[in-house]
Amino acid sequence: MKKVSIGIIGAGRIGQLHASNILNSSLLQLIAISDVYTDHLKGTIYEQQVPIITNHSEELINNPEIDAIFICSSTDTHALYIKAAARAGKHIFCEKPVSFEIEETKEALQVVEEAGVKFQVGFNRRFDKHFRRVHEVVKSGKIGEPHIIKVSSRDPEAPPEEYVKRSGGMFMDMTIHDFDMVRYLSGSEVTEVSVNAANLVDPMFGTHGDVDTALITLTFENGAMAMIDNSRQAVYGYDQRVEVFGSNGVVSAENEAQTNVQIATKDSVELDHPKYFFLDRYKDAYVEEIKEFAEAILEDKPLTCSGEDGYKAELLALAAKRSWEEKRSVSLTEVNTVNI
Amino acid sequence: MKKVSIGIIGAGRIGQLHASNILNSSLLQLIAISDVYTDHLKGTIYEQQVPIITNHSEELINNPEIDAIFICSSTDTHALYIKAAARAGKHIFCEKPVSFEIEETKEALQVVEEAGVKFQVGFNRRFDKHFRRVHEVVKSGKIGEPHIIKVSSRDPEAPPEEYVKRSGGMFMDMTIHDFDMVRYLSGSEVTEVSVNAANLVDPMFGTHGDVDTALITLTFENGAMAMIDNSRQAVYGYDQRVEVFGSNGVVSAENEAQTNVQIATKDSVELDHPKYFFLDRYKDAYVEEIKEFAEAILEDKPLTCSGEDGYKAELLALAAKRSWEEKRSVSLTEVNTVNI
Amino acid sequence: MKKVSIGIIGAGRIGQLHASNILNSSLLQLIAISDVYTDHLKGTIYEQQVPIITNHSEELINNPEIDAIFICSSTDTHALYIKAAARAGKHIFCEKPVSFEIEETKEALQVVEEAGVKFQVGFNRRFDKHFRRVHEVVKSGKIGEPHIIKVSSRDPEAPPEEYVKRSGGMFMDMTIHDFDMVRYLSGSEVTEVSVNAANLVDPMFGTHGDVDTALITLTFENGAMAMIDNSRQAVYGYDQRVEVFGSNGVVSAENEAQTNVQIATKDSVELDHPKYFFLDRYKDAYVEEIKEFAEAILEDKPLTCSGEDGYKAELLALAAKRSWEEKRSVSLTEVNTVNI
Amino acid sequence: MKKVSIGIIGAGRIGQLHASNILNSSLLQLIAISDVYTDHLKGTIYEQQVPIITNHSEELINNPEIDAIFICSSTDTHALYIKAAARAGKHIFCEKPVSFEIEETKEALQVVEEAGVKFQVGFNRRFDKHFRRVHEVVKSGKIGEPHIIKVSSRDPEAPPEEYVKRSGGMFMDMTIHDFDMVRYLSGSEVTEVSVNAANLVDPMFGTHGDVDTALITLTFENGAMAMIDNSRQAVYGYDQRVEVFGSNGVVSAENEAQTNVQIATKDSVELDHPKYFFLDRYKDAYVEEIKEFAEAILEDKPLTCSGEDGYKAELLALAAKRSWEEKRSVSLTEVNTVNI
């Protein structure tokens, strides 16, 4: 059976995760990895099993044996690689966000469109079995018209200061997943964003002009409302829950616990903690994500999350940032200055 | 043992509930009930067991054998009865809201203060064992500083149109409980209110200028934030949940199910519905509420929810209404035109 | 409305519980309480509200104003009072077990039958909303033919030695409720009993020839099997769960927790304990039990648990005891030496 | 890094599962597969990725490059392959049961012991994260001395008749996992077995002298008791739960649901079904099982489940069969005619 052959640009944590999943996949084949630094790959399974390890991304982009490029490099380089890969006729899987500048994202996606290649953005949570089931239940009409969508999304621990400096801010770095999730669950487009945020977890965030705690309210075209709550630090574990309340019912997804074990003694009745790390919580989702990318290419099917989804989530992050800065509700039309 | 002797003004649904609980109480004694209509009490246990049934509230207020008055009449009459009862030296239990006009509420509470009588407002949910436990856990410091408070409060079915006309609007009638709840759980005062609301359940609400669905964001003095979500119609039952997320953990209270029974077949795995009716869900809370009122009088102890709590919840309802009308965040100082 | 007027024989813990529930009931009226000792009732609500408090049970049995007798005295006196009350034409509510001797039980129930009075035995768990729902689901056929029935029944703490001496042994005193429960849930009769038991909790039980831990296997006429597990001491609370597994599914009832609160911190995820005390766990069941007794009398309806149910549970306790003593499976025909 | 090189004998469902997991493992390397039939492997990843596919098991056993043999053939061939592999100095992973004849098992294990090779039996459930956690909690002493151990183990659907004919009977084929589990959880040895069983699911089982439903009671050296309940058909999914109740508390493991999604409508409150298929439920356990086998070889560590564990579970299956046939409790000394 034909496999989709892959080159990965960027061999950091997420690049290595995809590399590992591709090596175990029956639909994808890993041909090459490029990174400006490759010393850390010495002696790893990547060196042993990946034919090409290089410091030059052009080697991947110009390699006729490579069908698709995974862009896992730092966000400020995404647009450049997207355009180069698209022009070389490669399909593209790009980590989120597409870029920090909405104009840049627009331009990159236009090149993609002109090239006619597949483009998937890395919103892994759409491939989580729990959230996908919620999405399907909403879509089936079982709970009627959606009225209220709630997303709790809290990281187990704050990222290091170096990361915060380059993250683009909490809305662009972390909440962007939740912006995509409310679009995915509601099946409708956001018209307005209103943010209440604060720096409660660690003053470090504030020194970089960032927040670490937020309540974000969104209004949708179909009349529904959504509320996202974020924290950079949930000491009890990675907290990832959603709920969609509608005219005929409610559907929700709880956290995955580390085990289903319960212990009761005189002093306490204890359950196990939620999974702590995102690579653990979304382990299967990351596998499913690239499997569906491969299938979309092999069978020429539409993608589960497209460039447009990446673009719209970025718009929401921009609107949220402006809402926070200007202490007012922001309409999507205010930030959506370009058409796509 | 000395019992607190009670007269109830208003023999509607909530008045009868209190009457029934007082009849079963070992701390309170029901001496009299007054209502403009009393025909519906004929042949009931109230007629059989309550010495005085009258159409004249003065008979209660002037009765020297009565220690305390329960005000369960329509909201527009509350202030009048509060003042009369306070001036007669009676302790007062008053259903929520104290009044529809904040100036009126203020004036009534001033009379209460001058009279030196006890005054409790009917925020029954403070006496619910689940919410009380959440309150205690927060207060204990176990979850650290509160950052995000979430209250889901959804009625099982929409009230009749006649009720909606006189309800004072969803914020004053229904959300007022949730406004009190976020104050109870946070242990801090709200500084700002921002509302996103809509008429999604039934156009009838809109014809009376009311909403039926809302997301309400609140900011507290201590830096915490809260989110209330409301719907007038949760078809699966009375949905009453809270969560307080803090620097050291999270505490939450789930709905009470009708039974703890689970049924699994080839087709489904089913749990029982949440309790459907507020009198069922808060049955024990209503009993506890009047027990603590009696104890506060008998032992001259402070009340769990005071006139000030009633006043502040009304302020929040006013701020919410203004936020909704003016589509902007409203500071409490804008509506709090009076000092208490 | 006519109420059923009641006399209670035996004013210990369970007698007082029924007295209190009758005082709060709209269907029953408490006329008299008798006990050999009545000093402990001085100054209580019973003295204040019950017209007759006496040391002579005949005053109740011969009182023409009394419709029904509650027998809450020590088990060795039950048969005597049953026969006297039946002959006086009183309906009877009798605490479990009917007696310690199966012949005595038979004889008492025959007198009841001849007198044509109602007789209810105090298997309060049949009136628990959770177990009743399980019973109804099984009866509805939703889970098909019952194959395996499981009952976990564990007390929170061991009874005092004085009680153990007079209890009739764990099977007669504690497991008797579970024997009734498996009959109630299966809708079939037991044919065989096999016991595995031990003295693991406290050597005190062993010194009185009793056990404190048991696994009891039962076979039913309809082919189903049941397993009861008992312990005299579950340090985490009163553990009362059932499960019925059948050809088309499974239905189960979990414990009631003290609250539905969950607390998650870095160190633990905690739920609340199960209700600890049987009066707390079965509070509503005790109310429902006497309500249905009253209705059966007022409307001449059949009882939910009859003398026959009491008799059959005793047979099972006897069979269990013999199985334990003789280390073998015991057929019900071996102990059922009398017909009823 | 050195990998353990593997040859698999038997390419049926379980053999292919191990083959697939070995191909994805960083500790094991799949050199060869043998089976009497190999046509079904044509065109699969096994043909593509496994160097040797043969009909002759000797090719594996005599291959000096192979460190360990996985025996996944039919049970009646296990002992033969065990002895041959052990004599060739290969480590052995053998599926359960070791054999159908306890003498044969004993003999095979003696050859293993003399050869000094590692021998692991395929009790995959010991590697399930939920059950392992329960085991660890018991071992930690947190719940005190174990008193009652409960194992629910029900297959989602009955096996085909062809399988039933060769399965060795329910106790040897299915319950053997549960016999191992109660030993694993209790940390003690069984002294006595008592079985109550029936043919309730499908008469087909009865025609082959087998049962499909059972309650099995076990007594342990340390005084604890266990109860296993089995059914060949739980229509709602694969039901795999355990509970250990002890002097200081209780620990239990619930089923894994397919998702953590809950749907509430007017008609029902629904959860997702338990995982249906054993390969789904124990997916991670099968991976962990071979990982620990590899580590035991590479680091010369003791195994989590040894030949002795396989032997003892078989003894329990024999005792259960005899208990069922002779309708009496059977002591382990009656079946344990050999020493190991």
Image (cartoon, coloured by chain):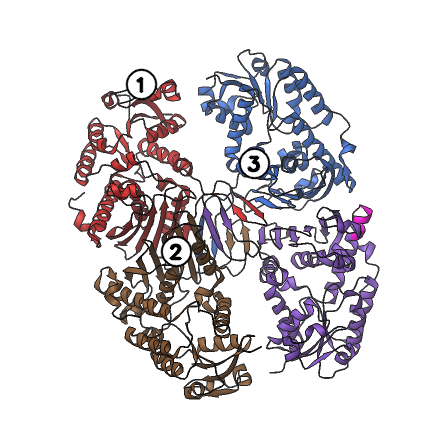
Chain colours: A blue, B purple, C brown, D red
In terms of secondary structure, where does tag 1 sit? Answer: strand
Crowd class of label 3 (few under 14; some 14 to 19; many from 20; radius 10 Å): some
Q: What's the magenta region?
A: B321-327
User: In which image quadrant can residue A8 be found?
Assistant: top right
- Asked whether, in this view, residue B309 is left or right of residue C122, the answer is right
Protein chain holding label 3: A
Residue labelled with disc 2: D143
- Quadrant in which the N terminus of chain D appears: top left
Identity of the residue drawn at 61% across and 49% down: B247
Residue A7 in sight from this viewpoint? no
In terms of secondary structure, where does tag 2 sit? Answer: loop
The type of residue carrying mark 3 is: Arg
Residue labelled with disc 1: D52
Crowd class of label 2 (few under 14; some 14 to 19; many from 20; radius 10 Å): many
Cα–Cα gap, marks 1 and 3: 41 Å
Residue labelled with disc 3: A132
Q: Nearer the viewer, residue A268 or A36?
A: A268
Residue A100 in sight from this viewpoint? yes
